[in-house]
Amino acid sequence: MSSIYRSADLDVSADTAWDFIERYTRSEVHVFSLCRAERQEGEYRVVTLADGQEVWERNVSVDPVHRRATYTVPGLNGAEHHQAEMRVEVDHRARARLIWVTDYLPHDIAEQRAASYDTLFAELVAAVNSHGDDAMAPS
């Protein structure tokens, strides 16, 4: 299986980052510019793309203890297997780090899609970092 692996240090605490990721799994935050809307249907996060197509992301695990969320999108980009993980870790400097790993079968899909994940991950990191601004703003 081939994987797309992205990681970045964050400007917010691990708790703030996890709060964002957990809200993401519940369709409560908007992240990606190629998406028009998100809604929750049971264990699925249903994403409406700009062209109206819907992508059904099935939450597999949302683990607040380990700050880890996994999901799968059957058939995404023609894949026979797709699974992704978003997790927040704390490094030796006590800084939060966001990690996003996406596994694909067949292998060549990961190679074909890797460049598009650079943009997606940059948008995700920006959204997580700005969530800290929102969380600290006066009500």
Image (cartoon, helix red, strand yellow):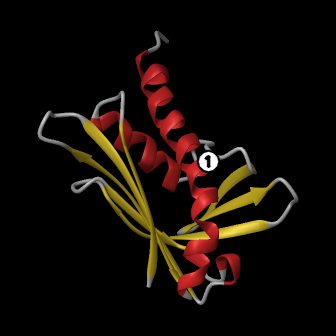
- Horizontal arrangement in the rendering, residue 75 relative to residue 25 (left or right): right
**Image x and y of residue 124, in percent:** 53, 44
The picture quadrant where one finds residue 115 is bottom right
Q: Amino acid at mark 1?
A: Thr
**Image x and y of residue 112, in percent:** 64, 72
**Image x and y of residue 6, in percent:** 43, 55
Along the viewing direction, whichever of 62 and 41 lies nearer the viewer: 62
Q: Residue at x 25, y 48 (%)?
A: 89
Along the viewing direction, whichever of 109 and 51 lies nearer the viewer: 109
- Horizontal arrangement in the rendering, residue 30 relative to residue 19 (left or right): right
- Secondary structure under badge 1? helix
Along the viewing direction, whichever of 25 and 125 lies nearer the viewer: 125
Number of disc labels: 1
Q: Residues within 10 Å of mark 1 (few under 14, many from 20)?
A: few
Q: Residue at x 74, y 50 (%)?
A: 34
**Residue 73 visible within the image:** no
Q: Residue at x 83, y 53 (%)?
A: 50
**Image x and y of residue 5, in percent:** 42, 62
**Residue 81 visible within the image:** yes
Q: Is residue 87 above or below residue 32?
A: below
Residue lying furthest left: 92
Return the residue at label 1: 119
- Horizontal arrangement in the rendering, residue 118 relative to residue 100 (left or right): right
